[in-house]
Amino acid sequence: MDLKEMFDPEGEVPPATPAATLVIFRNCPEGGPPQLLMVQRSKEMRFAGGAAVFPGGRVDPADYELAEAHGASEDEHREELAARIASIRETLEETGLAVGLHQRPSLEEALAARAHLLEVGTLAPVLEAMNWTLDLDGLIPFARWRPKHKEIRVFDTRFYLANLGTGAVDLLVDATENTHLFWASATEALRMADTGDIKVIFPTRRNLERLALFDSFDAAVAHVADYPSRMITPYMEMRDGVPWLLIPDDAGYPVQGEVLETAARG
C-alpha cells in the first residue's frame, strides 16, 4: 500500500474502534493560562505507547447500555451519549478524577468510586452506590478524529471539554496503562514535546496548538460555537516532493499539518 492510498480521504475507510477523551481545564494555581490534565501512557501499550495524551479510552458495551438508560434511542444519539459516558468512566479509572457529574465529590468519595469502578468495571453500579447523577450536557464537544491510515490501529475518537475550575485535587495514576499524570498549559505541553520531555502523537499536537489559543475555559467554549465539533480525517499531500500529513484548514486549528516523516501517529 502506497502513501497516497493509505491517506486518501476519498478511498475506503478502515474499521475504527469508538473512543472518547476528556480535555479537562483547571485554573492555574499561580495564575496565567488554564492547565490541562494529561496522562503519559505506558511504553508497552500498543497504541500511543509512551505518549502523553488526554485521559480517555474505548467505548465499552456497558457505556451504550447506560446511554440507553439515559434516553438515547436513535443510533447517533446513542453513540454520542455512550462516548461521553466512556470519557467520564475512563477519566475516573485512569486518574481518580470524578467529573461530568451534577455532584461535586470529595477526594474520599472519588477514591472510593474509583476503587469500586476498578472492581466492577462499569460505571452504572458506581453511580448508584455513590448516589451520583451524570451531567452529560456539561461536556462540550470539541472535535472528532478518525484517522484513515491503515498500518496502525484506528480509533474514532470524540474529544470533549470539561471545566474543573479549581486546581485543588489529588490524582492517582492507573499503573496498568499509564506511568505519569501531570497538569500543564497547552503552550507548556507543546514546549515539553519540542524539547523531548514528552512525546505527542499527531492529533494531540494539533489539539494542543488549538487549545493554546484560549486564555480560559469560556474562551474555548466560545471558539467551539464558531467551529463546532466535526470529523477530522488527516490526509497526505505532496509539497515540493515531500509528503505532508494535513487536516482541513477550516476546522479551527491554527496549524494544519507537518511533514509526514515527523508526524507521530501511534
Image: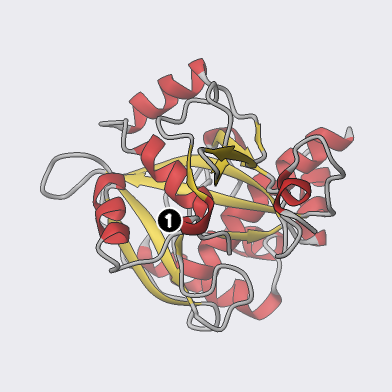
Q: Where 182 sits versus 174, above or below?
A: above
Q: Quick one: which residue is furthest to the top in this view?
A: 226
Report the front residue among 106 and 221. Answer: 221
Could you tell me which residue is drawn at 66 percent across and 50 percent down? 85
Residue 81 falls left or right of residue 213: right
**Seen from this angle, which residue lies furthest left?**
30
Q: Is residue 18 visible?
A: no
Residue 201 x/y as whole percent? 49, 58
Viewer-closest of 108 and 185: 185
Residue 185 at x, y percent in the picture: 27, 48
Viewer-nearest residue: 187 or 10: 10
Between 83 and 53, the one nearer to me in the picture: 53
Residue 89 falls in image quadrant? bottom right
Name the quadrant of the N terminus: bottom right
Side of 32 relative to 198 (left or right): left
Q: Position of residue 117 (x, y in %)?
A: 62, 71
- Image: 126 above or below 6: below
Q: Quadrant of the C terminus?
A: bottom right
**Secondary element at tag 1:** loop
The residue where tag 1 is placed is 105
Q: Amino acid at mark 1?
A: Pro
